[in-house]
Image (cartoon, rainbow, N blue to C red):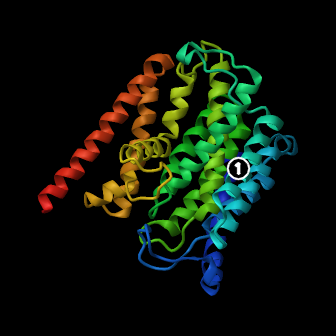
């Protein structure tokens, strides 16, 4: 426990000290600044390499506080993170073709699946499917990592939002892994959370820096790895274990629900308008909440609280299987989306 607290403090301090240096350096280099325009909400030119500070805080913390054998355990995860940091950095400086970004993500995801053994080996009774064929397992795991990575990147659209969601999810994973005896995975998750908290002090409205793809892709990648590991570890816990959830898949989804829900919602809206699901627009949940009059801070806090509410649903329903809890979560999410759309339409009609 002492090592974990010291790791959090270390990642926080390093990131807190590095971010102002990145801000000052970026202001001297125009290519390192995010310029307003198009679909972007911010009104001023802002540095966009906050992810570098977050990654530095994490790495220093792990070097100092992880024992060598634990560092060996995470070396491929850290290598995957580094790949995503490099891809994000390149895209933040000089836009990278989506196909190249996807290829890099596939390499990082394949490293996790083939070299660490962290993968989805079953559907855990969901849809009546249990054990997966090894090839299917590998494909599903790589696909899941890529989806979660990019879904988190898509919610990084306003001050404080991505950081708030990251802190909620990473802290939840960190606490749970500690409670089930996996202290080093807990330290990994909470060290990243400490770095993100330090970043948020500069990213809160009005923001002085963005995490950029450098931060969003790497954090999303860690989300995916932790979610898959959570599902597997939780599923294999003894039935009488104090912190076991019967619905492994649904609980993992609830912890990272905001980026997943928002991505699914936006894809459905685009398809309903006969548009490509990859067409950029301003229909994300945070755009919708801001159209209802919320500020950046209010939107970030509202979605953070919503994420906590979903985690509360998972806690309250920890005795139910996926076949019960997942439909309940999906029905609630659909109703929430319809309610949000209804409120926006009503507000627009009133303003006419």
Q: Residues within 10 Å of mark 1 (few under 14, many from 20)?
A: many
Task: Classify 70 as above or below 51.
Answer: above
Residue at screen point 59% across, 57% down = 216
Q: Position of residue 40 (x, y in %)?
A: 44, 68
Residue position for label 1: 105
Q: In this rendering, would 100 be left or right of 47?
A: right
The reply to whether residue 344 is visible in this rendering is yes
Q: In this rendering, would 38 be left or right of 23?
A: left
* Viewer-proximal residue among 274 and 162: 274
Q: Position of residue 32 (x, y in %)?
A: 62, 77
Work out which residue is located at the far front of the displayed protein and give it.
274
Q: Position of residue 42 (x, y in %)?
A: 43, 72
* Viewer-proximal residue among 173 and 242: 173
Residue 111 position by quadrant: top right
Q: In this rendering, would 167 be left or right of 179?
A: left
SS for dot 1: helix
Residue at screen point 63% across, 41% down = 224
């Amino acid at each position: 426990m002492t090592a974990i607290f010291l790791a959090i403090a270390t990642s926080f301090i390093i990131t807190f000290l590095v971010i102002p240096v990145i801000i000052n350096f970026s202001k001297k280099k125009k290519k390192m600044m995010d310029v307003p325009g198009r679909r972007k909400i911010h009104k001023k030119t802002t540095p966009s390499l906050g992810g570098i500070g977050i990654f530095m805080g994490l790495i220093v913390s792990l070097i100092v506080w992880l024992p060598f054998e634990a560092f060996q355990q995470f070396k491929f995860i850290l290598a995957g993170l580094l790949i995503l940091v490099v891809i994000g950095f390149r895209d933040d400086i000089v836009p990278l073709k989506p196909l190249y970004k996807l290829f890099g993500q596939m390499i990082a995801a394949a490293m996790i699946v083939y070299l660490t053994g962290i993968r989805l080996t079953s559907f855990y009774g969901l849809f009546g499917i249990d054990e997966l064929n090894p090839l299917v397992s590998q494909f599903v795991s790589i696909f899941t990592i890529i989806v979660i990575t990019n879904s988190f990147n898509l919610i990084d659209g306003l001050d404080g939002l991505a950081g708030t969601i990251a802190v909620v999810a990473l802290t939840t994973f960190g606490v749970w892994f500690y409670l089930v005896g996996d202290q080093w995975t807990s330290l990994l998750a909470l060290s990243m959370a400490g770095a993100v908290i330090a970043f948020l002090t500069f990213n809160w409205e009005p923001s002085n820096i963005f995490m950029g793809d450098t931060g969003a892709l790497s954090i999303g990648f860690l989300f995916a790895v932790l979610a898959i590991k959570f599902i597997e570890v939780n599923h294999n816990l003894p039935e009488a274990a104090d912190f076991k959830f019967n619905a492994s898949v649904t609980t993992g989804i609830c912890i990272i629900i905001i980026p997943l829900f928002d991505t699914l919602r936006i894809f459905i809206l685009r398809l309903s308008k006969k548009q490509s699901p990859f067409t950029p627009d301003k229909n994300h949940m945070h755009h919708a909440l801001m159209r209802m009059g919320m500020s950046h801070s209010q939107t970030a806090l509202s979605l953070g609280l919503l994420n906590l509410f979903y985690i509360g649903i998972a806690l309250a329903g920890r005795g139910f299987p996926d076949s019960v809890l997942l439909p309940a979560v999906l029905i609630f999410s659909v109703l929430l989306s319809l309610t949000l759309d209804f409120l926006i339409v009503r507000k627009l009609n009133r303003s006419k």
